[in-house]
Structure formats: structure tokens, C-alpha cells
Image (tube, rainbow, N blue to C red):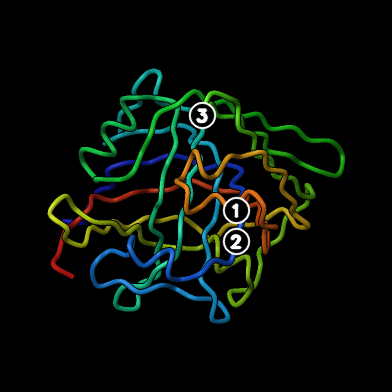
Amino acid sequence: MPQRPFLTARWSNLGLVNYAVDPALLAPDLPPGCELDLRDGRAFVSLVLFDFLDTRVKGIRWPGYVNFPEINLRFYVRHQGQRGVCFIRELVPRRFIAWVARTLYNEPYTATAMRSEIGQDKTHIEADHHFWFAGKWQVARVRGRRETNVPAVDSEEHFFKEHSWGFGKSRRGALRRYRVDHPVWAIHPEATAELKVNFAAVYGEKWGFLKRQMPDSVVFAVGSEVAVYPHSDSAA
């Protein structure tokens, strides 16, 4: 019998703010059996902001947990030819969501006050996110042109937005992975970002330099329906 998804939702208006970083910073967070997925010989982290819409867990829409924003800091890995992502920290506005993610997936979720808004005019669209951390509102915005296109598979945009796997570690230190299905995403071109984020406070002191570093690129993806499948654990 085909495996059924654990979670379905629509991930909407995904901003990815991408930074080239020293691979040594990511080595302690690599799950067993994984290696960094490099682009042009460089390792990257991405600050990702988006909205969960019409969220269902095993087909059920739970009141109060259907539509909400998420912001995460992630990096890119490979495992036996499978491309995927790992997370440094994921922020959501509901404590129960964070508890379930930490308990079932051992994912680094934290709950905090958050809000998001989408604005647009005749030519541009903007996703505006605010989240409370370290005693103040942190701000992350992405903006792009309203028209959309689908980048080539060898493009920088495709590299950052298209991944079919999430990887992490179980509490026993085993490789944990789960599959994420969605169609290829279109993007809003000419994307830019405005960040007022205390990276050291939110993600740890070793990431504090990102506050001063200019992003290497920004991708603003339209998003789509997604299906997240149950995790599996293995030694490597």
C-alpha cells in the first residue's frame, strides 16, 4: 500500500535569503552519512520565511493550527545522491506545533510570537514577517516582481528552492529523514530582501556575522501544495 503523507499544506510566498558560509561552521550539524551539498564549491545557509496554509495532519484540519507563518535557518546536504535540507532552528507561533516537531521529529523548533503580511501593487509583491525574539521584534521582508517564471534546473534559484528530503538526527544520533513532495515552484524575479534580524540571539553566536554579511542571492518562490511523509531512521 502506498505510504500516506503525515502532513499536507500549502506553502506560500517563500522567501529564501542565501549566504555563502565556511563549511566548517556546518560540520557539527551534519547528520550521519550526509555531506554538504555545495554549489560552485561553496556551502550555503538560507534564512527562509513563508506561510503554512490549509494545514492538515493525517487529513485533519485542527482549529488554530491551519494557517501560520514559519521562519527557519537551513543548510543543504546530500545523502546517497538524495538532495535535501537540514535545519539550524525553525520558528513557529504555536507552542504545540513546536512541541510535536521536537518530540516526533527531533527538529529544532521554537515557538514565539509571529505575524506575516502579503502586500502587492501593479508591479511587485512583498512578504513581510515580524517575529519576537531577544526582547524585540525582528523583521524579515522579501520583494519581487509580480510576474512569475520557472527557472532552469541548472539555475541558482532551482538549487535553493527544490529539495525532496529533510534530514536530521534522532535522539539516539541516528540519521532521520523524511520526504517532501511538491511540484516545481515558479518564482517572482528580481527578488530583494530587507532584514533586521539579530542572528546571534536567534540562531547562536557563531551565526552573528550574518547580520553584517550581504546575502549572495535572494529567491522569492510562489509555493504550492506540499505533502510531508512520515520519517524513517537509519544508522547512516
Q: Find residue 116 and report its horizontal and vertical position in percent.
A: 61, 29
Q: Is residue 49 left or right of residue 230?
A: right
- Quarter holding residue 13: top right
Camera-near label (2 vs 1) is: 1
Please tell me whether residue 35 is drawn above or below residue 64 in the rendered image.
below
Q: Residue at x 16, y 60 (%)?
A: 174
Please, what is the three-letter code of the amino acid marked with disc 3?
Ala
Please tell me whether residue 117 is drawn above or below residue 156 in the rendered image.
above
Q: Find residue 29 and report its horizontal and vertical position in percent.
A: 33, 60
Q: In what quadrant of the picture does the C terminus appear?
A: bottom left
Residue closer to the observer: 10 or 125:
125
Cα distance, mark 1 to mark 3? 16 Å
* The label number, if any, that marks residue 55 in the structure image: none
Q: Earlier in the sequence, mark 2 or mark 3?
A: 2
Cα distance, mark 2 to mark 3? 23 Å
Return the residue at label 1: 210
Toward the top, the furthest residue is: 63
Q: Is residue 123 left or right of residue 93?
A: right
Please, what is the three-letter code of the amino acid marked with disc 1?
Leu
Element type at marker 2? strand
- Quarter holding residue 140: top right
Q: Residue at x 55, y 41 (%)?
A: 50
Residue closer to the observer: 6 or 220:
220
Q: In what quadrant of the picture does the N terminus appear?
A: bottom left
Q: Are marks 2 and 1 in contact (CB under 8 Å)?
A: yes
Q: Earlier in the sequence, mark 1 or mark 3?
A: 3
Return the residue at label 2: 19
Please, what is the three-letter code of the amino acid marked with disc 2?
Tyr
* The label number, if any, that marks residue 134 in the structure image: 3
